[in-house]
Amino acid sequence: MNVFVKDKNIELSKISIIRDEILNLFNLNTTFNSLSIKSIPKLSYLISGTELYFSKLDHFYCDSNTNSNFLGGLALTNTSIKKLGFNIMVHTNNYLGIIKLIKVQKNLKEVNFIYNHLRISNELCHKSLEESLINCENTIQYLRIDWKPITNFLSNLVNLVSLYIINSCYDYTNWNHLEKVSLPLLKFLKTHQISSWILACLIKNTKGNLIEINIHYQDVDDGRLLKAISQNCPKLCYLKLSSFNSNTLDFENLLINCQSLIGLQIIGIYGCFIDWDKLFETLAKFSPFSLFKFKFKFSFSWQYKLKALKLFLNNWNDRNPILLQIISTEHTYIERQQQQQLEDLFQIYKEKGIIKKYALENPHNISYDDFEWIQKKGSDTIV
């Protein structure tokens, strides 16, 4: 069940009618396993008194406008939520109800704390939400938080499999408490705007189980990040990097040591120099046999890199055919003439069997998820 009601769109005279219609959904035999409530701060009583019908919820989503009394009532009847999402709205400070609900859960596996605006900070709220998760430390496996961790709560989540951290406030100070966090079962790591040295520390403490790393950060790696990946990720299958070390030796070692690597995405961003000629040369020489999926995003004109790209493709003999995606940030899209040059080049290598499938992507309308090369977003069929 999903409830999407905004009080500003409803006349007061019609509230009782809406309440009756909602209550008609319920009867003694009704149970729900999924509930999503958004933006009903003054209308929460529309479903108050129905908490018993949600005693077997598996999935629950709400935001910080949701009435705390309803959430408190839900905490009295429901301890079975497995997946929980909490959207923190701007200019609201209502989180006590969701904390009560989290603390009573017996099998909470996935938690998503999401900010709907960047650069919003509420340390008291963050601290309270983090501490509430300690009550579920043995069950939580998937976690997303959109702020810099305030406490050492991550050290308690020993069964964490997936971690997604967004530094939404762009606060780069006082991250030292993450240096010693040990996440021995972690398989999926995704971060946004977290410095390479903190990531290196996290990766060193994952005990070699990482299979997917997705990093977005506008900075130059001093070498620690690539070395940490190279030395601690023997099972790595997918890697996205936007913080890059110009020392190709570190990248060579990564390719040599990560023999399970299947997909690689490298993002060239403004202010961070990448020697693409060297990078393509290194890929051609040292890529593991398993690696055949590539995405490259550039902030420069492609016409000056065709020679390096040709060299890379020419040296891709006796390997799995490549799945290749190119994303250019030059203006709004690759200029038509330049795009045609790439189309012609890729078609030649597709006919040779070097390239299996390619795509030239608009940076403002990306068709594929980060680690997807075949199926487009929103598509249920293979294209």
Image (cartoon, rainbow, N blue to C red):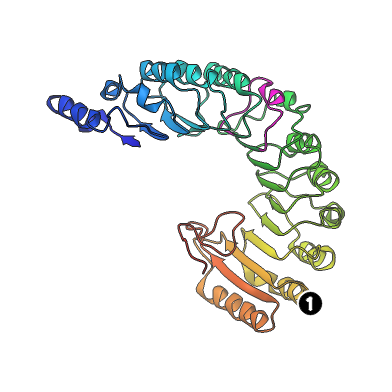
| Position of 335 relative to 183 (above/below) | below
Crowd rating for badge 1 (residues with CA inside 10 Å; few <14, some 14–19, many 20+): few
Disc 1: which residue:
317
| Position of 51 relative to 194 (above/below) | above
Label 1 secondary element: loop
Residue shown at 41% from the left, 30% from the top: 62
Q: Position of residue 223 (x, y in %)?
A: 82, 45
Residue shown at 85% from the left, 51% from the top: 250
Please tell me whether the stretch drawn in magenta is mainly helix, strand or loop: loop
| Position of 74 relative to 169 (above/below) | above
> Which region of the structure is painted magenta?
143-161
- The quadrant of the picture occupied by the N terminus is top left
Identify the image quadrant of residue 339: bottom right
Identify the image quadrant of residue 167: top right
Q: Position of residue 60 (x, y in %)?
A: 44, 32
Based on the picture, tell me whether residue 142 belongs to the magenta stretch: no
Q: Position of residue 306 (x, y in %)?
A: 68, 73
Residue shown at 50% from the left, 18% from the top: 99
Q: Is residue 106 visible?
A: yes
Q: Is residue 94 visible?
A: no
Foreground: 97 or 279? 97
Residue 366 lies left or right of residue 254; in this view the side is left
Foreground: 284 or 374? 374
* Amino acid on which disc 1 is placed: Asn
Identify the image quadrant of residue 359: bottom right
* Count of numbered labels shown in the rendering: 1
Foreground: 2 or 43? 2
Based on the picture, tell me whether residue 155 belongs to the magenta stretch: yes
Foreground: 349 or 330? 349
Q: Position of residue 56 (x, y in %)?
A: 44, 29
Residue 381 lies left or right of residue 345; in this view the side is left
